[in-house]
Amino acid sequence: VSREETGGINEYNWEIMTQRMSKLASSLSSYQEHRPYPIERLHVFMLGDMLSGNIHEELEATNEFPLAEATVQLGFDLGEWTNSLTEMFPFIDIAGIVGNHPRSHKKPWAKQGYDNADWTAYHIMAQALKHNDRVTVDIPKASQHRVTVADRWNFLLFHGDGIRSTMPGAPWGGVSRRAQALDAQYNALSKPIDIFCLGHFHAANWVRTNAGRIAMNGAVKGVDEYTMKAFGGGVPPEQMLLTIHPEHGPTDCSIIQL
């Protein structure tokens, strides 16, 4: 992302990414230090589009590194970043699903959606972390994945790219309908969902619906040339931090500005 081409609003490259990841780690450290009680387990939900990919010709031309190189480097960088977090949290559980950007086909596939550079980067990260017995890594092939937190609270992770909306930043009609449809599917299997987690829209939001709570994460990247041209702007880089109490469920939602 070019600062000049966004009119001075944002800039993004690999170095800036690692700086923002470091800031995110520092924020997590501050969160741990200032809680009146210890946090023993950190869940990291990686919700896809960890890489830009080559699905658009302009991205293939302007990406800082070729996709293969970026995939390998991101896997190692995520492993190093996670290892740094073990200095703050006794246990870390990572779950990673794929996004739509680093897919291997021009048009999205419903089948074999894990044929995606996100999935490869997660596995490289897992290999980098395999000797750390305080970290678990869960990398499903499914496009949505159910994760239980604190032995009781069920999260459903999905990227969100299949949701149709004409309102980037506030796509709540489509998101709510998708949560209701997923809720019905999982209830039919006696696998209820308490919180739906997605990314894709690059804007952090926390909403209660009839189907359950929805946690939409922001993006490390922030505004880019596409959002400026198509929508006039976007949301600054941010990430969502939820606190889950074993008995009471979600008790806090914080937005970490990067």
Image (tube, rainbow, N blue to C red):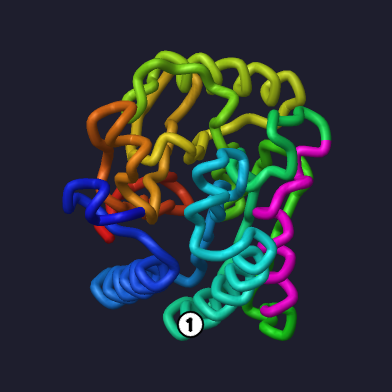
Left or right side of 128 for 177: left
How many numbered marks, from 0 up?
1
Q: Quadrant of residue 95?
A: bottom right
Task: Give residue 22's position: percent from left, percent from top.
Answer: 37, 75
Q: Residue furthest left?
A: 8
> Depth check: 211 or 51 in front?
51
Instruction: Report the residue at 67% width, 22% height from top.
Output: 187
Q: What is the quadrant of the C terminus in the image?
A: bottom left
The residue segment tinted magenta is 112-128
Magenta span: predominant SS is helix
Task: Give residue 193's position: percent from left, percent from top.
Answer: 59, 32
Tag 1 secondary structure: helix
Left or right side of 19 for 165: right
Q: Which residue is mark 1?
A: 84
Q: Residue furthest right?
A: 112
- Asked whether 119 falls inside the magenta stretch, the response is yes
Task: Give residue 49's position: percent from left, percent from top.
Answer: 55, 48
Instruction: Report the residue at 55% width, 80% height from top.
Output: 80
Instruction: Report the residue at 36% width, 54% height from top.
Output: 1
Residue 3 to residue 228: above or below: below
> Depth check: 185 or 57 in front?
57
Residue 156: in sight, yes or no? no
Instruction: Report the residue at 62% width, 22% height from top.
Output: 182
Residue 180 to residue 217: above or below: above
- Asked whether 163 falls inside the magenta stretch, the response is no
User: Which three-letter amino acid code belongs to the residue tagged 1?
Assistant: Ser
Task: Give residue 228's position: percent from left, percent from top.
Answer: 28, 36
Residue 220: in sight, yes or no? yes
The crowd level at tag 1 (other Cα within 10 Å; few <14, some 14-19, many 20+) is few
